[in-house]
Image (tube, rainbow, N blue to C red):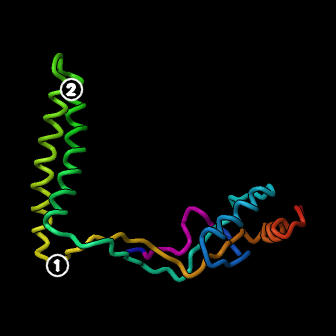
Amino acid sequence: MTQPSRIPPTSSGNYRVLRTVPTYAEAQQIVDALSDEGFPVEHVRVVGTGLRSVEQVTGRMTNGKAALYGMASGAWLGLFVGLLLGLFTVGGWLSVVLWGVALGAVWGLVFGLVGHAATGGRRDFRSVQGLEADAYDILVNAEHIDDAAARLTGGGSTA
């Protein structure tokens, strides 16, 4: 079994830290500034350090909400299937589309309720997950670190 690498295997090289910033937006601004100065940004990496998983609870999940969300997603799927089948219908394509939406909504409602009931009350909330970093290192290939530093400080290219 292989262990995950901290450095992508497709990009080898010796990288040095150019700057460390607290937000990803600041890291993007630095890379954008290097790009605007004509620096070859393919030699740059942005690496998040101190990663942690964050889950933001967005609300309570009830049977009614599970049914409503299921019905809505089923209706969208039914619309797609109805439109697809409607392409091959000679007359009354609108009724095919509407039946697709209606049947999709009903089945979505049923599956939404069944799916929520299957959790047995162990997860009665909705949430979104993401990764956050404490800081972001802007790494530059060691061969280009002096050039990048000079361009960031306004000194231009050293090559």
In the image, residue 106 above or below residue 41 = above
In the image, residue 32 above or below residue 142 = above
Range of magenta residues: 3-12
Give yes or no for residue 8 being in the magenta stretch. Answer: yes
Q: Nearer the viewer, residue 45 or 113?
A: 113
For label 2, count other residues whose C-alpha is less than 10 Å away and answer few (under 14), some (14-19) or many (20+): many
Report whether 67 appears left or right of 49.
left
Q: Image quadrant for the N terminus?
A: bottom left
Q: Main secondary structure of the magenta part?
A: loop
State the SS at label 1: loop
State the SS at label 2: helix
Q: Position of residue 98 (x, y in %)?
A: 17, 34
- Residue shown at 16% from the left, 21% from the top: 92
Give the spatial CA distance, label 1 vs label 2. 41 Å
- Label 1 vs 2, first from the N-terminus: 2
Q: Say which residue label 2 marks.
A: 86
The type of residue carrying mark 1 is: Arg
The image quadrant that residue 40 belongs to is bottom right
Give yes or no for residue 14 being in the magenta stretch. Answer: no
Question: Any mark on residue 122, and which?
Answer: 1
- Residue shown at 15% from the left, 51% from the top: 108
- Residue shown at 14% from the left, 72% from the top: 119
Report whether 118 appears left or right of 9.
left
The type of residue carrying mark 2 is: Gly
